[in-house]
Image: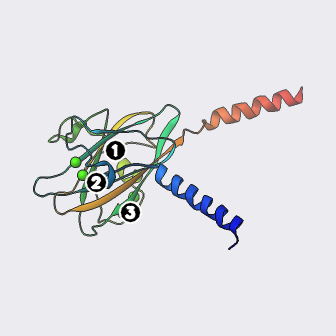
């Protein structure tokens, strides 16, 4: 490889590495344990596109629940939640979300937007999309469509075994309503006819 190609390649690799790490918003191996206090979740800063969160949880010696909060800015929506990492195949881990900056009551699911068990049923395993399961959960709650602008607190825990896990929360611009697009097209058409 000549020098020019080599340096271009090195820049390409450096850029790829930078973009690959830029969307990791929290990694417990580097950033420490996500809050175990449901009233004071770890506040994460998310941006458009991919927002990855990696952690681990253990039932011993004390249960390590992980709570984190993020804001979906105006004009954006949560369009996908990918179960990026999960190193257990026969376990069911608990995953829940509440609107706002805390999980209000650990013993009462009625404050939750959605609560589900993930990890062992096809469609909820490593690499799978979880937004559909959040919409139609197997424990409690549910909602229609994508999650719009606002503040949300997520809760993940596994009471049986130690588990590594990772999620990718994808924020995308809210598409313009089809009727607005049709209207805009119609106005354009009228203007052109004049
Ligand atoms: Ca924790
Ligand atoms: Ca943890
Ligand atoms: Ca799914």
What quarter of the picture does the C terminus occupy? top right
Q: Is mark 2 within 8 Å of ligand 3?
A: no
- Residue 145: image quadrant is top left
Callout 1 environment at 10 Å: few (<14), some (14 to 19), or many (20+)? some
Label 2 sits on residue: 138
Residue shown at the point (17%, 41%) measured from the top left: 106
Q: Secondary structure at mark 1?
A: loop
Residue 20 x %, y % = 50, 56
Question: Position of 70 compared to 2: left or right?
Answer: left
Q: Is residue 29 visible?
A: yes
User: Which residue is more in the foreground, 89 or 85?
Assistant: 85
Instruction: Answer with the quadrant where ligand 3 appears in the image.
Output: bottom left
Q: Left or right? Give the position of 49 relative to 156.
A: right
Vertical comparison of 76 with 19: above or below: above
Among the two numbered marks 1 and 3 on one chain, the one whose residue lies closer to the N terminus? 3
Foreground: disc 2 or disc 3? 3
The residue singled out by tag 1 in the image is: 142
Which is more N-terminal, label 3 or label 2? 3
Give coordinates of residue 183: x percent, y percent. Answer: 70, 31
What is the quadrant of residue 111 in the picture? Answer: top left
Mark 3 is surrounded, within 10 Å at the Cα level, by few (under 14), some (14 to 19) or many (20 or more) other residues, namely some
Residue that numbered label 3 is attached to: 123
Q: Which quarter of the rendering shows the N terminus?
A: bottom right
State the CA–CA distance, disc 2 to disc 1.
9 Å
The x and y percentages for residue 37 are 19, 40
Which residue is the extreme one toward the left?
A: 61
Is residue 51 or residue 6 the one in the foreground? Answer: 6
Is the CB–ligand 3 distance for label 1 below 8 Å?
no
- On screen, 8 above or below 97? below
Q: In this view of the protein, can residue 124 be seen by the observer?
A: no
* Distance between the alpha carbons at the discs numbered 2 and 3: 12 Å
Q: Which mark is residue 54?
A: none
């Amino acid at each position: 490889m000549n020098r020019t190609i080599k340096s271009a390649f090195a820049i390409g690799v450096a850029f790829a590495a930078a973009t690959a790490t830029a969307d990791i918003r929290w990694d417990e191996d580097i950033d420490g344990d996500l809050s175990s206090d449901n009233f004071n979740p770890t506040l994460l800063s998310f941006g458009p596109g991919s927002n990855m969160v990696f952690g681990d949880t253990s039932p011993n010696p004390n249960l390590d629940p992980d709570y984190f909060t993020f804001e979906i800015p105006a004009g954006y929506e949560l369009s996908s939640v990918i179960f990026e990492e999960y190193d257990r195949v026969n376990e069911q881990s608990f995953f829940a979300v509440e609107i706002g900056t805390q999980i209000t009551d650990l013993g009462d699911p009625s404050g939750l937007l959605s609560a589900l068990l993930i990890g062992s049923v096809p469609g909820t395993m490593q690499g799978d999309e979880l937004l559909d399961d959040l919409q139609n959960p197997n424990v409690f709650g549910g909602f229609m469509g994508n999650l719009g602008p606002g503040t949300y607190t997520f809760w993940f825990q596994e009471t049986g075994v130690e588990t590594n896990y990772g999620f990718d929360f994808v924020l995308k611009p809210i598409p313009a309503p089809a009727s607005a697009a049709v209207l805009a097209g119609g106005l354009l058409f009228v203007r052109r006819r004049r």
